[in-house]
Amino acid sequence: MAGLAGARAGIEKAGGTDTATLHDALESVAIDDIKGHVAMRKCDHQAVQGGFMVKAVKKDGVAHPVPEIIASYPGEKTTPACNKETFED
């Protein structure tokens, strides 16, 4: 989950780095990062975060195509339910 930001949020929530306390805190930590809200689910330790569909577009003054967001989806639409691998099972 979002690397250092997620670890920092877990340590802050736990009030320190005691292993047992930190483990419990990390199971339900949430942060806001560059992609939006990211929350760890306790039930299966999956990070639930939104998703984006982009297209590569040419921009003046840029030598390479850059991503342009054309659609965004909430975490509930990009992450299957707890302990499921797909939206169908």
Image (cartoon, rainbow, N blue to C red):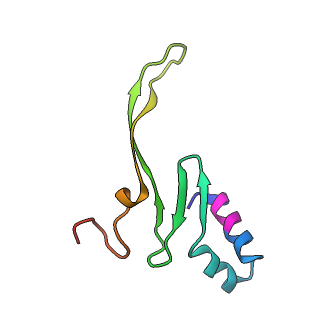
From this view, report whether residue 62 is shown above or below residue 22.
above
**Camera-nearest residue between 65 and 16:** 16
Is 33 positioned to the left or the right of 45 in the image? right
**Most distant residue in the right direction:** 16
From this view, report whether residue 25 is shown above or below residue 9.
below
Q: Residue at 60%, 69% (x, y): give it.
A: 29
Q: Residue at 61%, 74% (x, y): give it.
A: 26
Residue 67, percent across and down? 45, 31
Residue 6, percent across and down? 63, 63
- Rendered-image quadrant of the C terminus: bottom left
Q: Main SS type for the magenta part?
A: helix
**Camera-nearest residue between 61 and 42:** 42
From this view, report whether residue 44 is shown above or below residue 80.
below
**Most distant residue in the bottom direction:** 20
Residue bounds of the magenta highlight: 5-9
Q: Residue at 51%, 18% (x, y): give it.
A: 63
Is 10 positioned to the left or the right of 75 in the image? right
Q: Residue at 46%, 62% (x, y): give it.
A: 48
**Most distant residue in the top direction:** 60
Residue 62, percent across and down? 53, 18
- Rendered-image quadrant of the N terminus: bottom right
Residue 61, percent across and down? 55, 14
How many labels sit on residues? 0
From this view, report whether residue 43 is shown above or below residue 34.
below
Could you say which quadrant of the image residue 10 lies in? bottom right
